[in-house]
Image (spheres, rainbow, N blue to C red):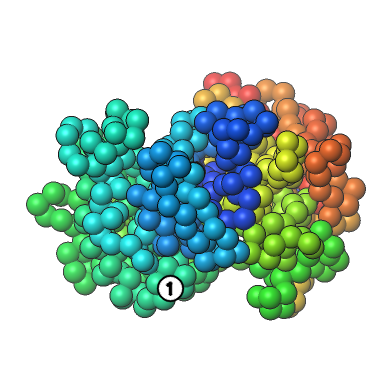
Amino acid sequence: MSAVVDLDVTGPTISPHVYGHFAEHLGRCIYDGFYVGEDSEVPNEGGIRLDLVEALRALDIPNLRWPGGCFADEYHWMNGIGPKEGRPRMVNTHWGDVEENNHFGTHEFMALCELLGAEPYVSGNVGSGTVREMSEWVEYLTRRGDSPMARMRRENGREDPWKVRFWGIGNEAWGCGGNMTAEEFAAQARTFATYCRDQGDNRLYRIAAGASDDDYRWTEALMRTVSGLGGAGADERHGHAPIQAVSFHYYTVTGPTWEQKGSATDFTADDYYRTLLKAQGMERVLGGHARVMDAYDPDKRIGLVCDEWGTWFDVEPGTNPGFLFQQNTLRDALVASLHFDVFHRFADRLVMANIAQTVNVLQAMVLTDGPEMVLTPTYHVFRMNRRHQGAASLAVHVLSETPAREVDGQQLRTFSASASVREDAALLSLTNLDTEQPVTLTVDLRGRAVGEPTGEVLTAAELSAHNVPGGAGAVAPRPFDGARLEGSTLTVELPPHSFATVQLPLRG
């Protein structure tokens, strides 16, 4: 294969927030994941697990979405503040019907974000909550002065307000968030967003809950109400639109039925390719939503957010079906690398993405087992790609035919790439999905002088290889010796079923 990269012709900046994360009150993501309690023998700060924080800080984690998910629309934030012993219990009806003690609430979440160095993304309750409830949450978190909510925050131990830009207006309103029609939700979202006020210099970025997969009609309904077509999209007195972004969700689910999604670790080569074909569908779905938005917002003032994405398989045998605990293999890592290539190509429209979820749930970064913790193959893709955050995108012009194979009557491209430049270095991300054949790629690097390349590669002997507590890392990056530079031509030899990053120092 051959390709050209013009190092001096940059595209839109890749938002760091497309490397965002998601922490829902679901299974062992919060309790026994992020939060072990202050009395735990696991080293912690205020109950927050510190080895987990250290691991995630290495990813330059830009934002964390909380408290859901479906849980957000049954969560009432005032039950999660004040002395822990006085907080009322609640039933998590969506995920396992378990009782929660509300010991992890608003202050604990904000402390977690501060430890991570991540921006908070708070998902508000539209389904079972009220406009006043969400408005007061914004005030509690972000207002200075002597208002009722600011006074309550001080009484609970926090003098200064926090900076909280990102607010989700509901979640999956077409389903668990209220079973609304698109038009019903659009009207609700506009009202809720209006009463989520900017407090002082804290400027809110309000994200309206959007579509499932390729439900473009839902996106169109939201765009009609926020773009100024079919109704005034801006508050003329205050000079801004009530909603700054709309979201959508896309999961890589390939089982024959929702109840039978397939095993995360026991799968055939055909299952593998079918999974990657579904992951490749992100390009079609994201592009479809972007085109709908372009029709109403050609200047791209309104952002697109994919705040839930990732693989979804059957839970691991012997675990609670409502906890959505699944293992994480090399296959999951390649799903992630494909997604990031797509996200980079849509840097002009996509402003945020959040993998589901960060710890112990679905396509997690980290799995814990008591005091032990492992980093998953997906974690390594995030770390290897971290220099794309905030970088200027570069087009990878593939000149030869991209290798592909037929899967269920469709074409799966078995090679994927993206690139960016930040400061005086370029980063190329390269994925070979073929289970058996290596790929040799020659890249004509134009526009700037290039120094000696360095890189890492992530692969394993088996597609189902994964990491377990107490065991050696079966899937971990290693130095990549398959990239060589001759003049301005980079030649890369990618092994089968692998992901690699190549960093190029630039001069001139």
- Up the image or down, 83 lies above or below 339; here it is above
Q: Residue drawn at (29%, 46%), measured in percent from left and top? A: 138
Q: Nearer the viewer, residue 47 or 119?
A: 47
In the image, residue 81 lies at what x, y percent? 38, 43
Amino acid carrying mark 1 in the image: Trp
- Up the image or down, 185 lies above or below 56; here it is below
Residue 387 visible, this angle: no
Q: Nearer the viewer, residue 294 or 450?
A: 294
Q: Residue drawn at (52%, 31%), measured in percent from left and top? A: 46
Residue 144 visible, this angle: yes
- Up the image or down, 289 lies above or below 61; here it is below
In the image, residue 157 lies at what x, y percent? 35, 30
Q: Nearer the viewer, residue 459 or 297?
A: 459
Q: Residue drawn at (75%, 37%), measured in percent from left and top? A: 372
Query: Horizontal placement of 291 versus 496: left or right?
Result: left
User: Which quarter of the figure has residue 55?
Assistant: top right
Q: Residue drawn at (52%, 25%), measured in percent from left and top? A: 423
Query: What element does badge 1 sit on?
Result: loop
* Mark 1 closeness class: few <14, some 14–19, many ≥20 residues within 10 Å: some
**Count of picture labels:** 1
In the image, residue 297 lies at what x, y percent? 31, 60
Hey, which residue is sitting farthest left in the picture? 237
Disc 1: which residue: 174
In the image, residue 508 lies at what x, y percent? 54, 21
Q: Nearer the viewer, residue 14 or 476?
A: 476
